[in-house]
Structures are given as structure tokens and as C-alpha cells.
Image (cartoon, rainbow, N blue to C red):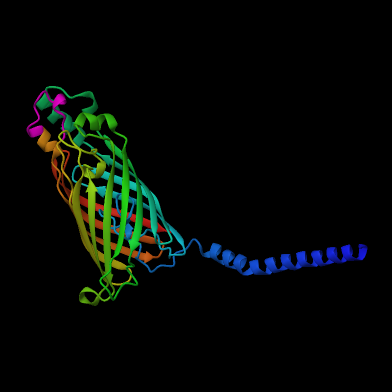
Amino acid sequence: MKTNNRLKKAVSGKLGVAAATAALLAGLPVAAHAAIGQAELFGMGRILGTGGVTSVNGLAGGGINNWALISGLGTNQQIGGTAFYSHVGLSNYNLNAYGASVGLFNRVELSVAHQSFSLGSTGALLDSAIGATLGSVPAPLNFGANYDFKQTIIGLKVRLFGNVVYDQYNWKPQVAIGVTYHDNQNKATLKALGARHHTGETYFLSATKVWVDGLFGLTTLVNYNLNYTNAIQQGLLGFGGVSHNKRKLESAVSAAIFLNRNVAIGGEYRQMPQYQLVAPSNTGGKVGALANAVSKTNNWNDVFVAWFPYKNLSVTAAYVNLGTIASVPNQHGMYVSLTTTF
């Protein structure tokens, strides 16, 4: 009996060692693969330029339009990211934007951006115009000099299907859907203006198609966006107006040609919804010319050149025309943006 017990213990011990050894050996390839995967998890395995640059709302794309591209240059097995700074100098205003994004496995993009829109000396002129119409300027609308409209934008984009590099010989574009959530810090001012909300969302569908052997034999990109939004001047002047708050469908298009692998030129066009501002309660019924002037919104457009000297850096310069903003027409000027990729 004792011999049998010793035998059972010996066999059991050997089986335990064998099982542990087998498990360890079986786990080595998995551990090795995990170690290699960990080393390559953060990278830039995609082709130069396939992450676009950064739009003013923080998402990958052009200057004023986001595209279906996912930010960074990470492959479907990598995580990549970007950080950006943009400055738009208009005839009467200035816009500064900065932020960062992360692209997950060339499938999902998360971004955050902050915008500051300065009225400069135009604030005092607006005060005079409002005072001349109303007899006095309501406290929240007393802009003075160098008043800033500020907002934070959080973005989410998901690539549904398609690949701008690999889908060269079929019709299929790269298609993505997403949303941007805007939180404007000028709640009291926007309420006095007549904007319905200081926060809001813009939903979008993007389709981007690239032909390596495109126009004139050069790599050519075309993008189309369908935006569902009630944002006024992209949310800088709030969301919805005094008459209604319903979102509108607006289109945006972009096109670019790569002159070589490092330089692209192109243009963009973006429809902007218009909502009636200036609340009647703040005007004593005088909502005519003043309300129309403040509410006037034009579509945006630009022409740009983007330079990709390295994988981790892009520089974009553009001429932008944003039309009428806060009653002041002909707002055009220069746009400069830097994006670093990592």
C-alpha cells in the first residue's frame, strides 16, 4: 500500500512538472509575439501623407474640412497620434486652435481641440452699432476690445470600410462616420445674441478617394462630407437661433493633387448653416437690419499647399475666405497650421 502511494505521488509529481513545462513552452510563442507586438504597437507604418493634416476642429483632414482618413500614421495593428496648432488671420478677426488626436489601429480616431476667436478692435465697433440701434448695449453684449469666443471640441471618427491606399482598382472610397461635441465658454453672451445653446453636436459622414495615378498622372485626392449640424460659425457663435433649433444637412468638398510625395496643393469648400440671431427681447422689437447683419453667414472656402518634409511633421499654408462673420463682411486672410505625428 505504501509502495502504491509513493508511486502515485511520483507519477502525480511528474505529471504536474510535465504539465507546467508544456504550458510554459506553449506560452513562449505567445509571450514572444506579445513582446514584439508591444514594441510595434506605437508606430507610423502607413505611407507619408495618408493621415492628411489637421482641420481647425482637430480631426484629420484638410484645413476647414475633416476627411475619412484616420489621424496619425499607425497601421491596423498600431496606435498613432498627432498634435497641432493653427492660426487664421482674417481681415478683422483672428482664430487660434490647438489640440491633439489619437488614431487606433487605423479604425478609430479620438481628438480634442480648443479654439479662441478674437474680435480684436471689431468688438468696440460692434458695441457702437448695437448701441446706435438699441440705445444701450445689454451687459452680456458689451464686447469691448479683444473679446474672445472660446470653445472646446471633442471628436470621434470611425472608419467603416475602404482604404485609400489599397482600394486603387475599384470604386470604393474610404468611408467614415463621426461626431464632434462643442462646448462654448461664452454662455451668457451667446444667450444674449439669441443662440439657442452654448453646446452642441455636429454629425458627419466622410468619403475619401485617392488615385495614385490620377489627374495628370499625379496622386489625386477627393473628399466629400455630409454634415448634420446646427452650429453657427462652427459653434463659435453657438447652436441654433431664435426662430428654430433644428439641424441642417450641409455639404463640404475637398480636392488635392500631390505634386510629389512631399507637396500637395488643393482647395476646399464648406457650406455653413444660417440661423437668425439677436433675440427680440434684447432689441425692443428692433430686429431688422441689426439682426440680419449679425446673423449673416457665408460658406467657407480655401486654397492650400501642404508640405510633408518628414513623416512626423507637416506644414500647411492656405488662403481662406470665410465671408461675413458677426456683421463684418469679406473676412479673408491667411491660414497656417503645423501638425506633428508620432
- Name the residue nearer the viewer: 47 or 199: 199
Examine the image and state in which quarter residue 303 appears.
Answer: bottom left
Magenta stretch, residue numbers:
277-290
The picture places residue 218, in percent across and down from the top left corner, at 25, 74
| Residue 3 relative to residue 40: left or right | right
The residue shown at (26%, 49%) is 88
In the depicted structure, whether residue 224 falls above or below residue 212:
above
| Residue 90 relative to residue 162: left or right | left
- Tally the numbered discs: 0
The picture places residue 94, in percent across and down from the top left corner, at 25, 44
Quadrant position of the C terminus in the picture: bottom left
Q: Is residue 124 magenta?
A: no
In the depicted structure, whether residue 262 falls above or below residue 150:
below
Is any part of residue 182 visible from this angle? yes
In the depicted structure, whether residue 305 falls above or below residue 91:
below
The residue shown at (7%, 32%) is 288
- Name the residue nearer the viewer: 340 or 34: 34
Q: Is residue 279 magenta?
A: yes
In the depicted structure, whether residue 213 falls above or below residue 140:
below
Is any part of residue 142 visible from this angle? no
The picture places residue 171, in percent across and down from the top left corner, at 25, 71
